[in-house]
Every structure is written in C-alpha cells, then in structure tokens.
Amino acid sequence: MFGLLRLFSRFGPLLIFLFLESVCMMLIVRYNDSQRLIFASSASAVSGAILQANSQLTSFIGLKKEIAAMQQRIAELENQNRNAFYYDENQTDTAFTKIDSSGLKPMYVFIPAEIINNSISGKQNMLTINRGKKHGILPPMAVISDKGVIGIVRHSTDHFASVMSALNTNTRISASVRGKGYFGSLIWKGQDPRYLYLVDVPKHDSVLKGDTIETSGFSTLFPKGIPIGTVAKIWIGPGESNQQIQVRLMTNFSTVRRVFVVKNLFFEELKALQQQSDNE
C-alpha cells in the first residue's frame, strides 16, 4: 500500500497528464469528423505496416523451409544419377551373371549441408559446413554445390567439418573436357576467385574456348561429370609441351551457401587397393 502511494507521489502528475491527454484525444476524434478520418487513416497505416512485416517474416520462414526441402530433394536426385552408381555385373567367357536385377549398386551418396564460414581472399582458403561425424562426414570426402565443385573435407568434429576450398593453392582436382576426354589437374593460382586452371593437358589436344570442364571421375572423391566451369582462355608458353587453360567457374564462391558432401561407399576398398599397389 505504502509502495503504491510512493509510486503515485513520484509519477502521479505524469500519469494524470497522460490520462487527461488521452481523454482529450478521444473527445477530439469522437466529435470532429476530419480528425476522426485522420486517426482512422493513421491507424490503418500502422496496422498495415505491422501486418506486412508479419507477412514478410512468415514468408521468410516458409522460404527457408522450402529451400531446405528443395536441397534434400536435389540430394535425392543426385543419388539417383547413373554416375553415382557402380555397375556391378560379373562377365565370364561362358556366362553373364547379374548380381542383382538392375546391375547397379549405389557408389556415391550426397549429404546436404550449409556453409557457415567461408573465405576467398587468402591463398589457402578454407570453409566450414554444419555437418560432421554424426552425419557421416569424414575426410577426405568431396564437397559440391548445384553449380560445381567446392572442395575437400579436411577435418570433422561431431557436428561440423572444415573443407579445403577449391580456391586453395594446395587443392588439385582431376578434371576433363566434356565430350572430348582430355583430362588434367585443376588448380588455383591464388589470384582471381572466379578462375581455376586446368594444367597437364598436352598441347596437341584440341581444347576450345567455351568448352565445359567437369570432374573426370579419375579419383575416389568426385563422381564423373560434376560441372566445374567453361574454358575462358588457352595459351601455350614458350618451350612448353602442355596447354595452360583458364577455367571460369560456374560457382560463385562469395555467395554459395548450400552444398552437398559426397560419400564414396567404395572409398575404403579403393584406398586399400591403392595402398597395396603402392607397397609393391
């Protein structure tokens, strides 16, 4: 009771002023047509702005869910791509035996993820994705987007993974010219993030400006046929036997957010085979 009295004694004049001001406003609006119209118009504008903001927020939340669902669907479609399968048939001199009814076994699966940290300004650029060991992400899995290659997983924790970007001078990706079969190594020279370079392609191979560059499939990480970019420039240095091919990337690394981690289901088997060959 005493607390209420102290509060009123401190703020009483202000409260009385606000009360009387409200009464005056109500009387003015109620008994004057022009002021009533102004008040109604202002109230409509305020409520309209609130409703619009609420609608935009609802649309944004719905769009984010829709994008996530679309990304999941793209991963499912990628998993159905023929290049993501291993053709498992056993042929002998006298018989042709199918292991299963289709002869196809999944070779790659695509796990949706989102980039939460990225850099493109250094020489050894890295990025971080919001998927880790609990989602089946382990090094050295490949990372791609719907536009092309992104990089290779280097480390993973339970919930996150660090990825060596294609914009890293230590990255080398086996790539080829679509429809022609010429292949080489794709590297970044640490300069313009819009371009990579395809090297080790002999000068007698006919590569033309505008040709599409894609993953060759000659690795255990990237499936064959993942788009990378288009040939922007070709030259041969004095005394060199290989072409220098500048590739304009399809992926904009400054804006890319949603990616897929590529898991090769035969990776351990292929790795063991490679180690056995190296030890001979």
Image (cartoon, rainbow, N blue to C red):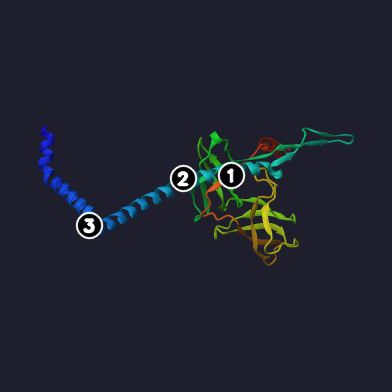
Image position of 237 with respect to 22: above or below: below
- Tag in front: 3 or 2: 3
Dot 2 amino acid type = Ile
Image position of 33 with respect to 130: above or below: below
- Say which residue label 3 marks: 32
CA–CA distance in space, label 3 to label 1: 65 Å
Res. 224 visible in picture: yes
Residue drawn at point x = 55 percent, y = 42 percent? 69
Label 1, residues with CA under 10 Å away: few <14, some 14-19, many ≥20: many
- Tag in front: 3 or 1: 3
- Say which residue label 1 marks: 260
Residue 232 appears left or right of 23? right
SS of the residue at dot 1? strand
SS of the residue at dot 2? helix
Instruction: State which tag comes first along the sequence, 3 or 2.
Output: 3
CA–CA distance in space, label 3 to label 2: 44 Å
Q: Which mark is residue 61?
A: 2
Dot 1 amino acid type = Phe
Marks 3 and 2 in Cβ contact (< 8 Å): no
The N terminus - image quarter: top left
SS of the residue at dot 3? loop
Query: What x and y, as percent, mark residue 208?
Result: 70, 64
